[in-house]
Amino acid sequence: MIERYTLPEMGNLWNENYKLQTWLQVEIAVCEAQAELGYIPKEAVAEIKAKANFDPKRVLEIEAEVRHDMIAFLTNVNEYVGNAGRYIHLGLTSSDVLDTALALQLVASLDILLKRLEDLIQAIRNKAREHRYTVMIGRSHGIHAEPITFGFKLAGWLAEVLRHQERLQVLKKNVAVGKISGAVGTYANIEPRVEAIACQKLGLKPDTASTQVISRDLHADFVQQLALLAASIERFAVEIRNLQKTDVLEVEEYFSKGQKGSSAMPHKRNPIRSERLTGMARLVRSHAGAALEDVALWHERDISHSSVERVILPDACILTHFMLHEITDLVTNLLVYPQNMERNLNCYGGVVFSQRVLLTLVDKGLSREEAYAIVQQNAHTAWNKPEGNFRDSLSKDPRVTANLSAAEIDGCFDPQNHLRHLDQVYQRLGI
């Protein structure tokens, strides 16, 4: 089984220490750029890089007095650096550091999410390959429709997560944007060349036209893409929940030794992880709405977005990371019951093969309307009756036997008729 989920892999990217580390990373990159252009002494930059540090607790102490997080941070850094600290934050505004550092966090988070998404892709691919020929009933409106295979169902999941992989790869490029353009973005006290050099050092590209902040459409896009991924995970989880119903029981979440399903009913084996994923998807979707609200800031900048992002960005990243871990483990260890799939497929004497009977009768010369009426009558005679048997009913109907031989009727009930083109889908996905 996949190792038990632990928070630090993603959570450490969103703690106070990592955030301040990215702030310092940005400040040093700007100092290096300034020195390359001859605006500050290279010796000072060397001293800054050697001495610069911070203490998160001390930053909070200073912030309690000055009521400004960036000033508190810079004050603390200068306590370590000394005289050379006068070159730190030269010509910058707080958002130069905040937004550029935030981009580093977003890119790092996407690296982790893409890694986890690749794990999910491989888990689905392996399970789809394993059940490529495991025949089951396809359902529409929750009602039995026509035969598919469980591998084909998983192929649809695979295609979906591959699209998410492409989206996140594009998103990683789109959010890798920094800005070192000063108050209201006019470069009044900083050279655009400093921005270009600093962003290059950080692996970012300069914003095309920043105000005092990077426009929040980028951040809204980030959260919406995570919400869309969460929605797909929820779709998979809901499918597992439906297929695990007692009267269906075609798949089941892995139930470990010693696990308990209910405090009152010892027989219960509940799809608790799938239900948990459904609930978490609701949370991530709610963050997408908040991110959209953040786009409309006043003029060149206000800070109404800041308090929101402090909640929704780490929360969305950590939730999505956890959801990817959970659904990957679920798929990897999913219990699949082909015998129950076969039982459900043949319910009421194979009424799900009605279209094949209809088309075969039309091929024999009956009008579609006449053939439909014959097949529907026999299907409804069998439907929802303990003794109902569609196949037997057809074999006793003179309107059918006058046109179809026993062998031709039997041929209508071969599920392979429905599966002969599925190889093309599997080939597209490399299954």
Image: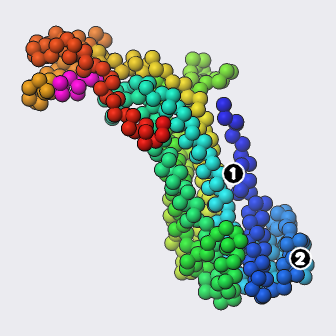
Alpha-carbon distance for marks 2 and 1?
A: 32 Å
Q: Which mark is residue 404?
A: none
Viewer-nearest residue: 258 or 8: 8
Residue 356 inside the magenta-drawn segment: yes
Name the quadrant containing residue 352: top left
Q: How is the image coloured?
A: rainbow
Residue type (three-letter) at the residue carrying disc 1: Met
Looking at the rendered structure, the secondary structure element under dot 1 is: helix
Identify the residue at image location x=78%, y=87%.
38
To which residue does mark 1 refer?
Answer: 10
Magenta span = 351-360
Residue 278 in the image: state x and y as whole percent. Answer: 52, 41
Q: In the displayed structure, does residue 123 sit left or right of residue 27? A: left
Q: Residues within 10 Å of mark 1 (few under 14, many from 20)?
A: many
**Marked residue nearer the N-terminal end (2 or 1):** 1
* Image: 378 above or below 219: above
Tell me whether circle 2 and circle 1 mark residues in contact (CB < 8 Å): no
To which residue does mark 2 refer?
Answer: 47
Identify the residue at image location x=69%, y=40%.
5
Q: In the displayed structure, does residue 309 sit left or right of residue 125? A: right
Residue 142 in the image: state x and y as whole percent. Answer: 36, 32
Residue type (three-letter) at the residue carrying disc 2: Glu
What main secondary structure does the magenta stretch of the protein show? helix
Residue 298 in the image: state x and y as whole percent. Answer: 54, 78
Residue 266 in the image: state x and y as whole percent. Answer: 60, 18
Looking at the rendered structure, the secondary structure element under dot 2 is: helix
Identify the residue at image location x=37%, y=29%.
148
Identify the residue at image location x=69%, y=82%.
194
